[in-house]
C-alpha cells in the first residue's frame, strides 16, 4: 500500500488518558500535515512537520497537544489528558515538498472517541 | 468573514445532469486551489487542483478559477449516484507566513438522484 497510513483507525479513551495517533506518509513524501474534523464541522489545520522539524503549529491547541516526526518512524500526534471535546476525526496528509503547489493526500484518519 | 465559503447544500441534481459547486475565498494572496471529495465516514480524496485562471478539465470534472472575483468552482458532468458526497474546497494562503497549509470550506453536500 503506497498511500498514507494511519493507525489506529479507531481509538477510545476515557477522560484524562493519553491518545497517540500515528501517521506514515506516502512513499517518497517527506512533509506531513495533521488536520482535525470535529463533528459537523470542517477540516481544520493543526500542524505541519518535516523530518525532525515542526514547521508550522499555528493550528495546534496551546495545551495538551504535541506532534513530532522523528528521523525514523511515523509522525505522532499526542493528546494528553483527553477531554470529551477532543472527540473528532484526525487526518494526516502528506506531500512531496512544502510548496503551496504541492498536492496533499490524506490518510484514512483516526476516529477518537473520549468517554 | 470566513476564509473559504461554500454553500452547505444539499445540492440535489438528477442523474446525468451537470452539478455545479461553488466556492469563494477571502485572501487575495491565495495561490493554490483544490477540490476534495469526502464520502460519509471516510477521508478526503483529492479530485482536482488548479493554480491559474481559467478552466482545467479531468474526465467528467472541470475546475474553474477566477482570481479577480476570488471564486473557484467545480463542474461535474453526467452526474452519477456514486458522486453523492460532500465536496470540500481548499485553498493555500500566505496568511501567517505559511504557504502550504490547506484552509477548507465547510463543504457542499451533493445528492445525485437516480
Image (cartoon, coloured by chain):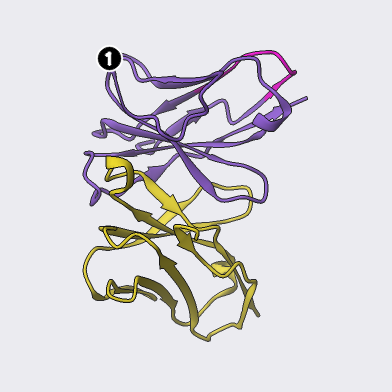
Task: Look at mark 1 in the image and give the residue it sits on.
Answer: A71
| Spot occupied by residue B30 in the image (x, y as percentages of width and height) | 29, 58
- As drawn, B18 above or below A54: below
Q: Is residue A70 left or right of residue A106?
A: left
Residue A18 shown in magenta = yes
Q: Chain B in the picture: what colour? A: yellow
| Spot occupied by residue A14 in the image (x, y as percentages of width and height) | 75, 18
Q: Chain A in the picture: what colour? A: purple
Between residue A92 and residue A48, name the one nearer to us. A48
- As drawn, B73 above or below A26: below
Residue at coordinates 43% horizontally, 27% vertically from top-left? A23
Q: Residue furthest right?
A: A115
Q: Is residue B3 left or right of residue A13?
A: left
**Crowd class of label 1 (few under 14; some 14 to 19; many from 20; radius 10 Å):** few
The N terminus of chain A - image quarter: top left
Residue at coordinates 63% horizontally, 71% vertically from top-left? B9
Q: Which residues are magenta?
A: A12-21
Residue B59 shown in magenta = no
Residue at coordinates 60% horizontally, 72% vertically from top-left? B81
Between residue B66 and residue B11, name the one nearer to us. B66
Q: Residue furthest front?
A: B1
Regarding mark 1 in the picture, which secondary structure is present there?
loop
Residue at coordinates 35% horizontally, 16% vertically from top-left? A73
| Spot occupied by residue B91 in the image (x, y as percentages of width and height) | 36, 56
Chain of residue at mark 1: A
| Spot occupied by residue B20 in the image (x, y as percentages of width and height) | 48, 79
Amino acid at each position: 500500500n503506497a498511500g498514507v497510513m494511519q493507525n489506529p483507525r479507531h481509538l477510545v479513551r476515557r477522560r484524562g488518558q493519553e491518545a497517540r495517533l500515528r501517521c506514515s506518509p506516502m512513499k517518497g513524501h517527506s512533509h506531513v500535515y495533521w488536520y482535525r474534523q470535529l463533528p459537523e464541522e470542517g477540516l481544520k489545520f493543526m500542524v505541519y512537520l518535516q523530518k525532525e522539524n515542526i514547521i508550522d503549529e499555528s493550528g495546534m491547541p496551546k495545551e495538551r497537544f504535541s506532534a513530532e516526526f522523528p528521523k525514523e518512524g511515523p509522525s505522532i500526534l499526542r493528546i494528553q489528558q483527553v477531554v470529551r471535546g477532543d472527540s473528532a476525526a484526525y487526518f494526516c496528509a502528506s506531500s512531496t515538498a512544502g510548496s503551496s503547489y504541492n498536492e496533499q493526500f490524506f490518510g484514512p484518519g483516526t476516529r477518537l472517541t473520549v468517554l | 468573514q470566513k476564509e473559504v465559503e461554500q454553500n452547505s447544500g444539499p445540492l440535489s441534481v438528477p442523474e446525468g445532469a451537470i452539478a455545479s459547486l461553488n466556492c469563494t475565498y477571502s485572501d487575495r494572496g491565495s495561490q493554490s486551489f483544490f477540490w476534495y471529495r469526502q464520502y460519509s465516514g471516510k477521508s478526503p480524496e483529492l479530485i482536482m487542483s488548479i493554480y491559474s485562471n481559467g478552466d482545467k478539465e479531468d474526465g467528467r470534472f472541470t475546475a474553474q478559477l477566477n482570481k479577480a472575483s476570488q471564486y473557484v468552482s467545480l463542474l461535474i458532468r453526467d452526474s452519477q449516484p456514486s458522486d453523492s458526497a460532500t465536496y470540500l474546497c481548499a485553498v493555500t494562503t500566505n496568511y501567517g507566513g505559511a504557504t502550504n497549509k490547506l484552509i477548507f470550506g465547510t463543504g457542499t453536500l451533493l445528492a445525485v438522484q437516480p
